[in-house]
């Protein structure tokens, strides 16, 4: 039962720009039970924040916003425990892949005791890349922060 609070209402019951929410493309395209009055309503696909317009009850969806697959900028960090091997290496896997490998990677290593690393990336792919620490030791390493940005984007 709804509390009556705006935040607890279903999308179709509140003043949201969209009438439907789906976790992913499979849920959106597999939805059914639409009626003629639903045509022209919008849906939010939450796995990638894309916006879709229902154009037929079968359903047929037209993408209005979001790239539907990728983000143009991704970032994160790799903790010391994620590095292994000799020389030390870790793998970054994106939650949502880029459309292609036309992206730039920036790496910043943070450590203690005035120890410095010059991490490099390798094995660049649409779904992620590897970070080579350039050392056989990770003593005093705290983390490596990374940012991947599609070519032409400004950070």
Image: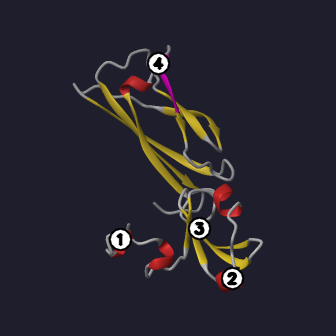
Which callout, 3 or 2, points at the residue further toward the start of the chain? 2
- Which residue in the protein does label 4 denote? 84
Quadrant, the C terminus: bottom left
Q: Nearer the viewer, mark 3 or mark 4?
A: 3
Q: At 71% across and 62% down in the image, what residue appears?
A: 29
| Total numbered labels | 4
User: Which of the two discs, 4 and 1, sits closer to the camera?
Assistant: 1
- The residue at which mark 2 appears reads as 39
Which of the two discs, 1 and 3, sits closer to the camera? Answer: 1
Q: Are marks 4 and 2 in contact (CB under 8 Å)?
A: no
- On the image, the x and y values in percent for residue 58 come to 77, 72
126 relative position to 108: left or right: right
Q: Which residue is mark 1?
A: 7
Viewed as shown, does residue 48 lie left or right of 109?
right
Q: Where the N terminus falls, by quadrant?
A: bottom left
Q: Secondary structure at mark 3?
A: loop
The residue to which callout 3 is attached is 66
Q: Earlier in the sequence, mark 4 or mark 1?
A: 1
Asked if the residue under mark 3 is in contact with the one under mark 1, i.e. CB atoms within 8 Å, the reply is no
| Earlier-in-chain disc, 3 versus 4 | 3
Kind of element beneath mark 1: helix
Which residues make up the magenta segment?
87-91
């Amino acid at each position: 039962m709804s509390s009556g609070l705006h935040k607890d209402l279903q999308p179709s019951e509140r003043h949201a720009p969209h009438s439907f929410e789906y976790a992913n493309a499979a849920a959106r395209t597999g939805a059914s039970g639409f009626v003629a009055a639903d045509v022209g309503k919008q849906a939010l696909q939450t796995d990638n924040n894309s916006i879709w317009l229902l154009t037929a009850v079968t359903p047929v969806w037209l993408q209005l916003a979001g790239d539907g697959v990728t983000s143009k900028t991704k970032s994160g960090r790799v903790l010391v425990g994620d590095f292994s091997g000799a020389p030390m290496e870790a793998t970054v896997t994106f939650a949502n892949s880029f459309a292609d490998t036309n992206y730039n990677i920036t790496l910043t290593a943070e450590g203690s005791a005035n120890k410095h690393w010059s991490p490099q990336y390798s094995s660049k792919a649409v779904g992620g890349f590897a970070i080579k620490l350039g050392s056989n030791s990770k003593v005093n390493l705290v983390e490596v922060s990374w940012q991947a940005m599609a070519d032409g984007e400004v950070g």
